[in-house]
Amino acid sequence: MDRRSFVIGTAASTTALWAGPIPAQDAYPSHSITVINAFPPGGVSDTITRPLDNALEAVLKQPVVLENKTGAAGAVGAQFVATAKPDGYTLLTHIVSISGFAEVDKLFGRQPKFTNADFIPIARIVADPIVMIINTDLPYKTLKELVEDAKANPNKLIFSSSGL
């Protein structure tokens, strides 16, 4: 901390003490909590988040409202939460792909709309296994066979993923 920051900080603290007692902050949560699901209703994130929200509501004794803010593979909802007031009343459920959005933006020369530093992880809710499924008409019986063929024939195989 530079000297000026220290002086300004000290002056502000001293002024606050002279102003008299400061009211205590409300206990958390003192009102409803909004959980943003960055994916469409009925999807995996939605079906996992709804029962979790019900359980949170029972424990926290406050309404927990689920809102779906979909688009751009989850980036729309994530950006909404990243720019929300950082008071703990707007939460996000997302999948692991959230960790790559800023890097993808940088790859295409775009200014990232949010980074991992904009979030504080509070819980891992699900640990899904990674599964690869292929058409039974294809000749591959192992992942090694598939990879070898993909290397031998670049741009011939089609791959899709829900992630980045």
Image (cartoon, helix red, strand yellow):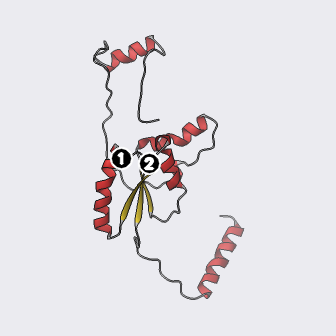
Q: Is residue 143 above or below residue 117?
A: above
User: Is the Cβ of the residue at disc 2 closer than 8 Å to that at disc 1?
Assistant: yes
Q: Residue at x 61, y 34 (%)?
A: 108
Which badge, 2 or 1, is on the more N-terminal residue? 2
Q: Is residue 1 left or right of residue 49?
A: right
* Residue 12 image point, x, y percent: 65, 77
Residue 6 placement: quadrant: bottom right
Q: Which residue is mark 2?
A: 38
Query: How many C-alpha atoms fall within 10 Å of the one at disc 2: few (<14), some, or many (≥20)?
Result: many
Q: Nearer the viewer, residue 90 or 67?
A: 67
Q: CA distance from mark 2 to mark 1?
A: 8 Å
Q: Is residue 137 above or below residue 101?
A: above
Q: Nearer the viewer, residue 1 or 8?
A: 8
Give the mark count.
2
For label 1, the SS is helix
Q: Quadrant of the N terminus?
A: bottom right
Q: Which residue is mark 1?
A: 45
Q: Amino acid at mark 2?
A: Ala
For label 2, the SS is loop
* Residue 130 image point, x, y percent: 33, 34
Q: Residue at x 62, y 87 (%)?
A: 18
* Residue 101 image point, x, y percent: 52, 41
Residue 132 placement: quadrant: top left
Q: Amino acid at mark 1?
A: Ser
Q: Is residue 162 above or below residue 32?
A: above
Q: Residue at x 31, y 48 (%)?
A: 47
